Image (cartoon, grey):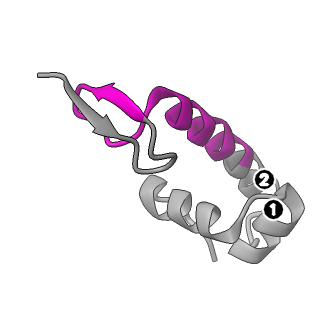
Amino acid sequence: MAALVNCKVCNRLFISKGSSICDSCSNENKDVYERIKEYIERHPNSTIMDISNVLDIPAKKVLDLVRSEQFQLR
């Protein structure tokens, strides 16, 4: 069942069918996830700060995506 909710990322209202984030934020997260994944594949010993600094992505966002997507970092 669809419900009108606020996105947990941007706080915009959207019609949710079970997701807690809107399509726009979801697409952005997918793009950032792919960038992080590609970087980790090329630099497997990277830290969160390395990834954040090189890709210019806030460390909190990198950490949140790493935790939710089960990346293997050393």
Numbered badge on residue 39: 2
Left or right of 58, for residue 2: left
Q: Is residue 29 magenta?
A: yes
- Location of the N terminus by quadrant is top left
Q: Nearer the observer, disc 1 or disc 2?
A: 2
Q: Quadrant of residue 30?
A: top right
> Which three-letter amino acid code belongs to the residue tagged 1?
His
Q: Give the crowd class for mark 2: few <14, some 14-19, many >=20 residues within 10 Å.
A: some
The percent coordinates of residue 14 (x first, y second) are: 37, 28
Disc 1 to disc 2: CB gap under 8 Å: yes
Which residue occupies 83% across, 56% down? Answer: 55
Q: Give the crowd class for mark 1: few <14, some 14-19, many >=20 residues within 10 Å.
A: few
Can residue 10 be seen here? The reply is yes
Q: Is residue 3 magenta?
A: no
| Marks 1 and 2, how far apart at CA | 6 Å
- Which one is nearer the viewer's eye here, 20 or 40? 20
Left or right of 28, for residue 7: left
